[in-house]
Image: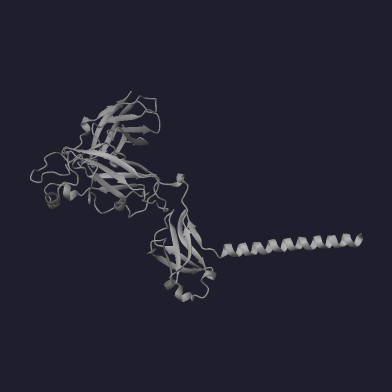
Amino acid sequence: MKTISFNNKKIRFHFLWSLIFSFLLLSCKENKKEKSAVSIQWNDQKAEGIVVPMELLTGVPKDSIPGSLRVQLANKNTSVLGEYLIKDNAIVFKPLIAFTRGLKYEIIIASKQLAEIEIPLPDLTMAPEVLAIYPTSDTVPVNLLKIYIEFSKQMQEGDALKNITVIKNQSDTIPSVFLDQELWNKERTVLTLWLDPGRIKRDLQPNKKLGAPLEQNNNYQIIINRDWQDGQGVLLKSAYKKNFIVVQRDGISPDPSNWTINKPTAGRRQSLKIALHESLDYILLKNVIRITDNQGSIINGIIETTNEETILVFIPSAEWKPGDYTVEIESRLEDLAGNNLNRLFDKDLSKSNMTEQKEIFTRKFHVD
């Protein structure tokens, strides 16, 4: 009985060690397999590189790797531009532009596929969105000068015109509506697109040869394609469309003396509302107007716009005090046609401007 018991213990002990050894061997194989796999190099949610372990390139001389190794879009034979670096016993390929999420890429060595890797799609909550296109009005003058596109996140530069389509009367795609340049704010969340000024000004040759970019009494649609990527290579959450109708030319400068001021009440943090009686430039409205007290001190607050940029709303940081106040407007404030407070954008050069030129226009109001 003792001998049998000993043998059973011996057998069980041997079996236990066999299991442990098999587990360790399997773990080593899995770790080795994991270490030898092609991987993605991430930086701030951007896929900025592909890492290829050197052991996958056995037999290929190091100095010949850059010439024989390439990365391309899967099934398209389109090579990705970038640089190859040897780092930590691996080859790191860094593209000039971050890889696009949702696309597959092939790693080719000596004309044979070494691996295929897919850049995973982000959580939809991470995807950028178009917040608005300004002017928000569904009618614009035929001499509309510029539009603004506002995004929820920082966007990539250089992709604007290939991701914006303008359609006339629901059928014709209109080319060359905007100037071939991009003007972004510092955060790259607001893009300014200029319609060709040379085609808007009637005395210039581009206008005489090509006509204005937009035609009166026609319907247009601006389409922002979903393929536009943000600064991290993430595609837009969805496409964005805006419809508008083109009406007659705007040949009158804005006039602050015609604005209607809805005065706030003293002792309350009430919004100051100013009816502008026309749509004005969204970005300029938020940057060229300030409210001052009777000592000339600026009243802190936030400026917003409503009703298709026809109403300016000033939200003060503190309660209003009784007294006199001034609305100060810089003369560079423009309407949708680029007419500012001092001059018309498309003015007749043969006529002299006899009106007084001012840098600041003012409107006063009293708070009781």
Placement of the N terminus among the 4 image quadrants = bottom right
Give the number of callouts: 0
Direction top: furthest residue:
368
Q: Quick one: 351 or 216, which is closer to the camera?
A: 216
Q: Quick one: 255 or 154, which is closer to the camera?
A: 154
| Residue under the image location 33 percent in, 29 percent down | 272
Residue 44 horizontal/vertical position (percent) = 47, 54
Going by the image, does 256 lie left or right of 291?
left
Q: Quick one: 306 or 180, which is closer to the camera?
A: 180
Q: Quick one: 205 or 269, which is closer to the camera?
A: 205
Residue 226 horizontal/vertical position (percent) = 36, 48
Image-quadrant location for residue 17: bottom right
Placement of the C terminus among the 4 image quadrants = top left
| Residue under the image location 26 percent in, 46 percent down | 166
Direction left: furthest residue:
350
Going by the image, does 247 lie left or right of 193?
left
Is residue 287 at all visible to an observer of this figure? no
| Residue under the image location 31 percent in, 29 percent down | 273
Is residue 197 at all visible to an observer of this figure? yes
Going by the image, does 288 lie left or right of 46?
left
Residue 205 horizontal/vertical position (percent) = 12, 52
Colouring rule applied to residues: one colour
Residue 132, compared with residue 55, is above or below; it is above
Residue 207 horizontal/vertical position (percent) = 14, 49
